[in-house]
Amino acid sequence: MTVEFIPLRDAHLDAAFALTQKLQWPHRPGDWQQALLLGEGIAAVENGELIGTLITWRWGADYSTLGLVIVDDAQQGRGIGKQLMLAGLETLAGSNIRLHATEAGKGLYEKLGFVATGHVEQHQCRQLPAVAAPACAAHQQIRSARQQDATLLTALDRQATGQQRPRLIANLLESAERILVLEEQGAAAGFACLRRFGHGYAIGPVTARTPAAAKLLIGQLLSTLGGQFVRIDTDREAGIGPWLTEQGLPEVDAPTTMIKGTPWRPESGGMQAFGLMSQAMA
Ligand SMILES: CC(C)(COP(=O)(O)OP(=O)(O)OC[C@H]1O[C@@H](n2cnc3c(N)ncnc32)[C@H](O)[C@@H]1OP(=O)(O)O)[C@@H](O)C(=O)NCCC(=O)NCCS
């Protein structure tokens, strides 16, 4: 029987969820729905059965991400992963593409022209110890984001990541538990998002001008999460990994960041990304 490569639809998501469960990946059905809502998916189907997935996210004209690249373990080694990737690359033609590779995926991505540029650290714990809320300095203020902040948050996110993600920001303003905005002398100096993901809560995206501002935002969120499962994915080069470990969130994994094209370099002194949305969506 031949394998068909067709658009991934909502109707596939129960089977897609089963694939991540089998891999012991943490995604809930709602995490799959959000991922597909914001991207374009490809399904590998044989005999009416979903045997592989991949989702691409085009974030504006220049930058894209791809992830949730999975082939059912009984079907691996048949070239299905490669076919999914070739279809994904076609969808994203002309864009600089970022992904985070497991050891299993790295060889495939290298063959397709992806180059390792660093690591993303996955920090998490099952039950966060109590964390005291850090205090703002006199010139700082933290407030909750409002719907009217969509344009502002989209612009801050774009400065930090190069990605134009108005749909993601709109989705987070609707669905996240909390989004905090840091203001310094009345001007926005960063934001951090707390949302449900996987086994509990995820913090990200986190965007700020300095590591100190990022820690202030993350610390405020952590102070409300004692006893909870908490996760944050951060670029190693952002440099806050050791601090996250001190807060009770040890590094549990560090997939390889790989780029096909030109990596985004944020302006020095401008907004930097300290927390990813997710390893897949980046
Ligand atoms: C990664 C994965 C999607 C690959 O799917 P697959 O269908 O087995 O891959 P293919 O059969 O298409 O192999 C593609 C190519 O990569 C090569 N390849 C696959 N795994 C490799 C590895 N670990 N090291 C080196 N090369 C590898 C194959 O030899 C093949 O090369 P070729 O086309 O020159 O013969 C699959 O192993 C998987 O689902 N793993 C678990 C989930 C996961 O880790 N996904 C990656 C997330 S980033």
Image (spheres, grey):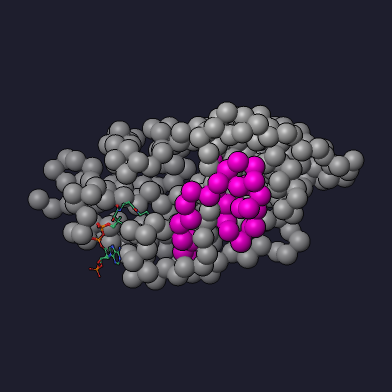
Residue lying at the far left in this picture: please name it: 1
Task: Please give the count of numbered marks on the rendered protein.
Answer: 0
Residue found at x 77% / y 38%: 134
Q: Image point 45% across, 36% down: which residue?
A: 198
Looking at the image, residue 257 sits to the left or right of residue 147; the answer is left
Q: Which of 207 and 245 is in front in this view?
A: 245
Q: What stretch is highlighted in magenta?
A: 231-259
Residue 9 can be seen, yes or no: no
Q: From this viewpoint, is residue 218 visible?
A: yes
Q: In this view, does 165 lie to the left or right of 98?
A: right
Residue found at x 52% / y 64%: 118
Queried whether the magenta region covers residue 62, the answer comes back as no
Horizontal side, residue 49 vs residue 14: left or right: left
- x and y percent of residue 17 in the render? 33, 37
Q: In which quarter of the view is residue 50 placed?
A: top left
Q: Does the magenta stretch include residue 256?
A: yes
Q: In which quarter of the image is ligand 1?
A: bottom left
| Quarter of the view holding residue 93 | bottom left
Report the residue that reaches farthest toward the right: 138
- 20 versus 160 height, above or below: above
**Residue 21: x, y in percent?**
32, 38
